């Protein structure tokens, strides 16, 4: 039994590779089906966000084989040669894999440490897999435990205090450039959760003129109305772009939303007045060639790292306490997983002793016809108690032994001593 994770994140790769290896939400069920077919009987979850793409698998195969097969899957699914992404791929197993997910869910591995959005994304990734029956007992418990650990960290530490979202960092960057947002026009492309969080932060910083752009104008209107803003359909973006001093884009589009030509046209209409564009989407919304234009300052999600690091300084003392909670959670979950290794042997031992009990009980009762029904029940209950008492200490000891490094020797010895078959 191997529990592994293979993936990339903002820690290991640049945004251009992350966007190539991102899983679109619409195709995740299909990808899960392919993985389930590839690893029969496996539990699988895919987690794909703007900062990471990860595959979690529990399977009977050796971990090295699992990682090899996952690399092949990633290569085939994204139509990219392994040599182009293996340098940034982390492949973890056992305690390392457990600790990784716990850190991710608790936002300790996020670009903005302490941000709350990642827990929802981990939950959504798990639910998506669970709904298509791609998970198993261990994966279910694994992700449920990660939610418990994350909640404990948010409740018992101050890691989430202050500016702890990608959107707030993006707004801080805009403020650092303009100093004062009053009188500035802000155009937000995308009306999803990230767009709404960004807009909320902008208004709190003093932005007065807001334009919300969305593919569906009705969705833009719903969000814009909450902040006295103006709604524009994505098809009309080019007509309104020149009005924006700050553009923040965070759509879920799979391709470019804003390319160089409309930005160049907007600059001419603005008489070359500077424009800041912050692209916090992965895959990226804004064509990188936009950065070649004069008087345009384009930042993508990797550029937010410096601001995020500054925000982390005030909460760095909380990290030690968070990591203690993570370590406690990893130890608890790993002990539980180790206990599962003993289950087949324990089940087989119980079945074997109870089979002996039933055979001998039937022989005895068949020769004691004078006993009443109540008497026979008492005798049967007595045999159950005897077997359960015999089993109690061996079962406890077997569960303790599997926590040792070489647990297989003990389990093999028990099977040989009692002539046990593997239990399924």
Image (spheres, rainbow, N blue to C red):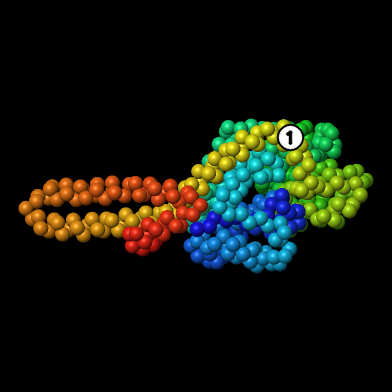
Front position in the image: 65 or 110: 65
- Which residue extends farthest right? 271
* Residue ID for mark 1: 313
The image quarter in which residue 172 lies: top right
Q: Residue at x 32, y 54 (%)?
A: 350
Q: How many marks?
A: 1
Q: Is residue 235 visible?
A: no
Across and down, in percent, residue 241 comes to 82, 48
Front position in the image: 383 or 138: 383
Front position in the image: 211 or 319: 319
Near mark 1 (Cα within 10 A), the count class, few <14, some 14-19 or many ≥20, is: few
Q: Residue at x 59, y 37 (%)?
A: 324
Across and down, in percent, residue 134 comes to 51, 58
Q: Residue at x 75, y 48 (%)?
A: 301
Across and down, in percent, residue 42 comes to 51, 60
Across and down, in percent, residue 229 comes to 74, 39
Rendered view: 119 above or below 56? above
SS assignment at label 1: helix
Q: Residue at x 45, y 51 (%)?
A: 402
Front position in the image: 240 or 352: 352
């Amino acid at each position: 039994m191997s529990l592994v994770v293979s993936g990339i994140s903002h820690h290991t790769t640049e945004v251009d590779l992350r966007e190539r290896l991102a899983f679109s939400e619409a195709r995740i069920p299909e990808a899960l089906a392919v993985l389930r077919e590839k690893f029969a009987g496996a539990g699988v979850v895919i987690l794909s966000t703007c900062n990471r793409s990860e595959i979690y698998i529990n399977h009977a195969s050796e971990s090295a084989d699992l990682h090899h097969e996952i690399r092949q899957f990633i290569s085939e699914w994204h139509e990219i040669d392994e040599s182009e992404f293996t340098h940034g791929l982390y492949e973890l197993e056992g305690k390392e894999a457990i600790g990784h997910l716990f850190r991710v869910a608790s936002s300790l591995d996020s670009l903005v440490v302490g941000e709350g959005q990642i827990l929802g994304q981990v939950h959504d990734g798990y639910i998506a897999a669970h709904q298509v029956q791609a998970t198993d007992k261990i994966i279910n418990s694994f992700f449920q435990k990660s939610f418990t650990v994350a909640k404990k960290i948010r409740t018992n530490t101050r890691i989430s205090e202050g500016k702890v979202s990608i959107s707030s960092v993006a707004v801080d960057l805009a403020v650092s450039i303009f100093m004062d947002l009053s009188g500035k026009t802000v155009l937000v492309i995308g009306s999803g959760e990230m767009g709404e969080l960004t807009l909320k932060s902008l208004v709190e910083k003093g932005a007065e003129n807001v334009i919300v752009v969305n593919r569906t104008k009705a969705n833009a209107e719903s969000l814009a109305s909450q902040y006295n803003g103006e709604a524009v359909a994505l098809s009309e973006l080019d007509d309104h772009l020149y009005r924006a001093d700050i553009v923040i884009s965070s759509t879920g589009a799979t391709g470019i939303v804003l390319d160089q030509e409309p930005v160049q046209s907007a600059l001419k209409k603005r008489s070359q007045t500077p424009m800041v564009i912050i692209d916090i989407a992965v895959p990226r919304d804004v064509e990188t060639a936009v950065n070649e234009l004069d008087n345009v300052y384009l930042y993508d999600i990797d550029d937010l790292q410096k601001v995020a690091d500054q925000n982390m300084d005030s909460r760095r003392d909380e990290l030690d306490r968070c990591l203690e909670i993570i370590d406690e959670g990893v130890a608890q979950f790993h002990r539980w997983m180790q206990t599962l290794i003993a289950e087949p042997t324990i089940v087989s031992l119980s079945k074997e002793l109870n089979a002996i009990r039933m055979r001998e009980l039937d022989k005895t009762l068949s020769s004691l016809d004078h006993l009443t029904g109540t008497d026979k029940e008492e005798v049967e209950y007595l045999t159950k108690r005897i077997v359960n008492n015999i089993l109690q200490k061996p079962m406890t000891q077997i569960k303790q032994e599997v926590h040792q490094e070489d647990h297989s020797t003990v389990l093999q010895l028990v099977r040989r001593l009692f002539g046990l078959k593997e239990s399924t």
